[in-house]
Image (cartoon, helix red, strand yellow):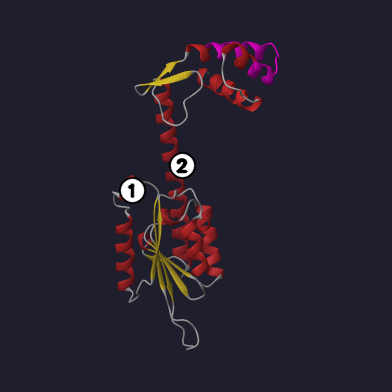
Amino acid sequence: MALVIIWHCCSNATEAPMKVYGYCRVSTPEQANGGLSLDTQRQQITGYAMMKGWSVAEFFIEAAVSGSVPLADRPEGQRLLAAVQAGDIIITAKLDRAFRSAADALGTLEQLKDDKVGLHMIDLGGDVTGNGISKLVFTILSAVAENERDRIRERVRDVKRHRASQRLYNGGKRPFGFDVVDGRLVPNANEQAALKHGRGMQANGDSLRSIAFVWMSEFGLGQYDAKTVQRILAREDAASA
């Protein structure tokens, strides 16, 4: 979400003049090619600021940073929050560009209010700190955005489970017991035999360390620690459940 911060001018001539800061974020290269691109966010922020008679002093650009990371834990997010002072205004282009969850959004909102920093969100129509109604809308939409992220994660998990059931490789580390051949998981005979033997030893009450030793000495596998053996056997049991 693009984020803009504006520093209001004060009547006291000794205080710094108002500044406007823009914050833009994309989490993946795919988003950069769509309606959430960094250029699109910059244009939205600049246009909103111009309508208000404001000028953006600096943009904080966050590329390939997941929305699951709280704003205050992102490199540019940290720098942005450190730059704002009382009288500034933050303008975001879209709710989910700035915040990871309803809790993160509302916690940041309360802190900004305590610091006397305004928060504007373009997709919510503007100021979300100025009155009770705007805060209510912000709270509801934060929860909606969080729910949508949860549903997306669940859909991704469903796809991966389906691909696994079809013996399709989902990427990442090769699962123990299989080789990857032309994008498919093909059983590795030696490792499958080791798994079967390991489950038998586990059923007989043998220790995980003993299973690791047998895998290495009898099956020629690598040296595994007890936790790794436990994780491999547990994953195999879950897959066959």
In the rendered view, tell whether residue 157 sits above or below residue 197: below
Q: Residue 107, how many percent across, how many down? A: 55, 59
Left or right: 39, with 172 as reference point: left
> Residue at point 65% right, 12% down?
201
- At x 36%, y 63%, the residue is 122
Q: Residue at x 64, y 14 (%)?
A: 214
Amino acid on which the number 2 mark rests in the picture: Asp
- Which callout, 2 or 1, points to the residue nearer the camera? 1
- Rendered location of residue 51, percent (x, y): 30, 72
Report the magenta stretch's main SS: helix
Residue 52, percent from left and from top: 33, 74
Residue 199 highlighted magenta (yes or no): yes
Graded by Cα atoms within 10 Å as few (under 14), some (14 to 19) or many (20 or more), the crowding at tag 1 reads: some
The residue where tag 1 is placed is 31
Q: Nearer the viewer, residue 187 or 205?
A: 187
Please state the extent of the stretch shown in magenta in the rendering: 193-213
- Horizontally, residue 233 falls left or right of residue 23, namely right
Vertical comparison of 199 with 130: above or below = above
Spot occupied by residue 167 in the image (x, y as percentages of width and height): 40, 20
Q: Amino acid at mark 1?
A: Gln
Between discs 2 and 1, the one toward the N terminus: 1
* Numbered disc 1: secondary structure: helix
Label 2: state its secondary structure.
helix
The residue tagged 2 is: 150
